[in-house]
């Protein structure tokens, strides 16, 4: 019997990946690295600094910058990303999210957020769903990012449920691997895939029957 839901943000609640991509693409261009949408798939669910490391490795420039320069680059990307978030509204919720969250609320299923994004609280507020989450994991409190299960385990603990009582929702492979590592039921949210290891795949959250999901 499942008792709580733990959601990823980008790709599950809203599509901020397109803004992350624009901001990273600009930053990468400024240091002579060209990234494309295929490469961008590898950045989904990955923390800001780990994303930068992957971009530098992709461009063969892993050893070209000091830690201070890397932090400056990550800040520049984030400032750009935050500007792109300014116009976010509830209309930017992914299809089916509002309906699914309303059902969870009606059935009193507690929800938590397990996002790698340090911008998550601001994004949830702009989307008008901040109140729907009982707990948001602070990514700064984590020793390891996804695919490590830590972020999902922290969320379950905060909801006072066991991992076996939790359902995790993710769009990225690193996230599905984290949910599986935590021993939770994994729902994969896909556009066109591929995503491996999920217990169930959907295109939008309101394809799910909450009663059946709670019985898993
Ligand atoms: P920030 P999620 C992740 O969100 C994004 O998928 C990933 O592209 C991003 O680098 C990461 O958040 C950190 O975001 O720079 O805003 O702290 O999928 O875990 O909700
Ligand atoms: Mg995601």
Image (tube, rainbow, N blue to C red):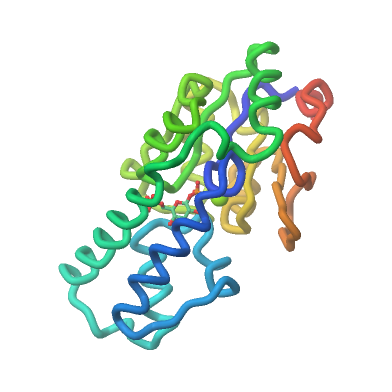
Which residue is located at x 33 percent, y 41 percent?
Answer: 141
Depth check, front residue: 43 or 173: 43
Specify the farthest residue to the front.
Answer: 87
Q: Position of residue 131 (x, y in %)?
A: 47, 19
Which residue is located at x 40 percent, y 67 percent?
Answer: 24
Q: Position of residue 132 (x, y in %)?
A: 53, 21
Dividing the picture into quarters, in which one does residue 91 lie?
top right
Against 83, residue 91 (above or below) is above
Against 143, residue 2 (above or below) is above
Quadrant, the N terminus: top right
Q: Position of residue 4 (x, y in %)?
A: 62, 24
Depth check, front residue: 58 or 122: 122
Which residue is located at x 58 percent, y 51 percent?
Answer: 175
Specify the farthest residue to the bottom.
Answer: 60
Against 32, residue 85 (above or below) is above
Please give left or right for residue 3 compared with residue 40 in the image: right
Which residue is located at x 58 percent, y 66 percent?
Answer: 41
Against 85, residue 124 (above or below) is above
Give the total number of marks visible in the rendering: 0
Q: Position of residue 6 (x, y in %)?
A: 58, 33
Depth check, front residue: 143 or 47: 47
Quadrant, the C terminus: top right
Please give left or right for residue 99 compared with residue 79 in the image: right
């Amino acid at each position: 019997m499942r008792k709580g839901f733990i959601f990823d943000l980008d790709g599950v609640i809203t599509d901020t990946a397109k803004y992350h991509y624009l901001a990273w693409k600009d930053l990468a261009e400024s240091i002579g690295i060209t990234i494309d949408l295929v490469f961008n798939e590898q950045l989904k669910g990955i923390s800001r600094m780990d994303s930068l490391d992957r971009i530098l490795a992709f461009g063969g420039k892993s050893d070209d910058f000091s830690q201070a320069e890397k932090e400056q680059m990550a800040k520049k990307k984030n400032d750009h990303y935050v500007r792109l978030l300014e116009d976010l509204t509830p209309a930017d919720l992914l299809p089916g999210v509002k309906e699914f969250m309303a059902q969870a609320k009606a059935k009193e299923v507690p929800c938590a957020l397990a996002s790698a994004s340090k911008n998550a609280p601001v994004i949830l507020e702009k989307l008008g769903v901040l109140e729907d989450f009982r707990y948001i994991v602070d990514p700064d409190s984590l020793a390891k990012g996804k695919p490590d299960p830590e972020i999902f385990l922290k969320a379950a603990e905060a909801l006072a449920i066991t991992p076996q009582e939790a359902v995790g929702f993710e769009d990225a492979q690193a996230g599905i691997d984290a949910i599986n590592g935590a021993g939770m039921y994994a729902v994969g949210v896909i556009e066109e895939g591929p995503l491996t290891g999920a217990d169930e795949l959907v295109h939008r959250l309101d394809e799910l029957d909450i009663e059946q999901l709670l019985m898993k």
